Image (cartoon, helix red, strand yellow):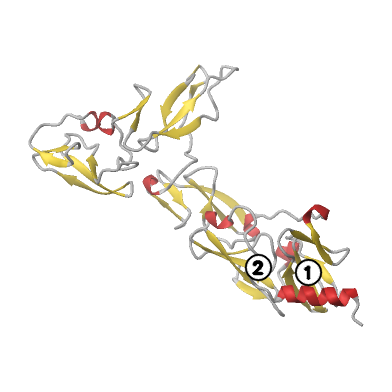
């Protein structure tokens, strides 16, 4: 007659063969990485993640090569000492189950002293090494070691830094480094610094002295974000009289630009702004900031694709066409 432990072993081995049990738990890490980037799953020593369109696609290492090596991108028999947090030894543990040090729901079954086989508990359960069973999360006191990005991604791979739209990370010799794009924003999907208008940003970097200086802070005032024509920061009055260190960012609705003088969102032609004037526009052609009001921009998806000239004519934004009538928009005044 089979023992309860033997029955459990069979049940867990069946789980080992089920490759689609693992789903993303929490916010998808692939929002940080460009397409086709491959990293080690931060919640498992034996799974890799391929990032496609900001969505994680999981693969599992099995058999005699149960661990994923983030540097080679391959399944291996064991990991180097530099990734000792994933060290698993089956020595003197044959037919036993070991907890995955990176996961509360992962485990290894020692088929023999040399072959740990990876598996996962069902959703909403944790593996309990003491009982050798999967149990409900509320019954678990599991804690796992925190992960560092450079332990899951290889060197020289750029990835997003959510602290600022112009910032990104890269690992250099296993050490996390902060990098900054110059006059551009970081685009996670391509892993490159691109035009600001191409990035849907909600963490615009604060301009220098955005809320004034200590000697003269701005109080309850809106100021341009110096990155877009629509965006602005609200500098609230501080009780201690210092400049607002964390002003709230917001932006004008479609087809409106922020005007610092009036402190309002108004018609774009009435605002002098040299950032992408196609941002948030519904028209295909809009006034350029080029002096003389003879040029216009071709817009696609809220981004400028070309600047065109009306020659000796003037661009009329209301008509969306070049006309002989002189235009004197604030946006393009000499």
Identify the secondary structure beneath mark 1. loop
In the image, 290 versus 107, the foreground residue is: 107
In the image, 228 versus 135, the foreground residue is: 135
In the image, 198 versus 284, the foreground residue is: 284
Q: Quadrant of the N terminus?
A: bottom right
Identify whether 78 is placed above or below 242: below
Is 313 left, or right, of 178 in this rendering?
left
Return the residue at label 2: 47
Marker disc for residue 70: none
Residue positioned 61% across, 74% down in the render: 74
Can I make out residue 141 in this image? no
Marker disc for residue 88: 1
Residue positioned 20% across, 42% down in the render: 296
Identify the secondary structure beneath mark 2. strand
Circle 2 residues within 10 Å: few <14, some 14–19, many ≥20: many
Q: Are marks 2 and 1 in contact (CB under 8 Å)?
A: no
Could you give the CA–CA distance between mark 2 and mark 1, rounded to whole angstroms? 14 Å
- Image quarter of residue 163: top right
Residue positioned 46% across, 57% down in the render: 189
């Amino acid at each position: 007659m089979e023992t309860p432990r033997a029955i459990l072993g069979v049940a867990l081995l069946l789980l080992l063969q089920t490759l689609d049990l693992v789903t993303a738990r929490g916010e998808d890490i692939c929002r940080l990485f460009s397409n086709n980037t491959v990293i080690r799953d931060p919640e498992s020593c034996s799974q890799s993640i391929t990032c496609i369109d900001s969505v994680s696609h999981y693969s599992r290492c099995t058999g005699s090569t149960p661990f994923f090596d983030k540097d080679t991108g391959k399944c291996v028999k064991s990991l180097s000492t530099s990734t000792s947090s994933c060290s698993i030894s089956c020595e003197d543990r044959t037919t036993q189950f070991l907890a995955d040090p990176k996961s509360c729901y992962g485990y290894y079954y020692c088929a023999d002293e040399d072959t740990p086989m990876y598996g996962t508990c069902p959703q909403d359960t944790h593996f309990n090494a003491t009982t050798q069973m999967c149990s409900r999360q509320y019954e678990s006191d599991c804690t796992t070691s925190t992960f560092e990005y450079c332990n899951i991604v290889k060197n020289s791979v750029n990835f997003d830094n959510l602290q600022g739209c112009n910032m990104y990370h890269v690992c250099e010799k296993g050490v996390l480094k902060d990098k900054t794009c110059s006059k551009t924003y970081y685009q996670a999907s391509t892993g490159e610094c691109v035009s600001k208008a191409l990035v849907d940003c909600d963490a615009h970097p604060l301009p220098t002295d955005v809320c004034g200086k200590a000697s003269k802070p701005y109080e309850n005032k809106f100021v341009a974000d110096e990155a877009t024509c629509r965006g602005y920061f609200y500098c609230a009055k501080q009780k201690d009289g210092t400049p607002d260190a964390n002003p709230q960012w917001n932006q004008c609705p479609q087809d409106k630009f922020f005007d610092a003088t009036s402190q309002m969102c108004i018609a774009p032609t009435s605002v002098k702004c040299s950032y992408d004037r196609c941002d948030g526009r519904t028209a295909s052609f809009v006034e350029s900031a080029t002096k003389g009001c003879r040029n216009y921009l071709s817009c696609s998806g809220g981004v400028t694709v070309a600047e065109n000239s009306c020659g000796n004519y003037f661009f009329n934004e209301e008509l969306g066409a070049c006309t002989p009538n002189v235009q004197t928009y604030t946006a393009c005044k000499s």
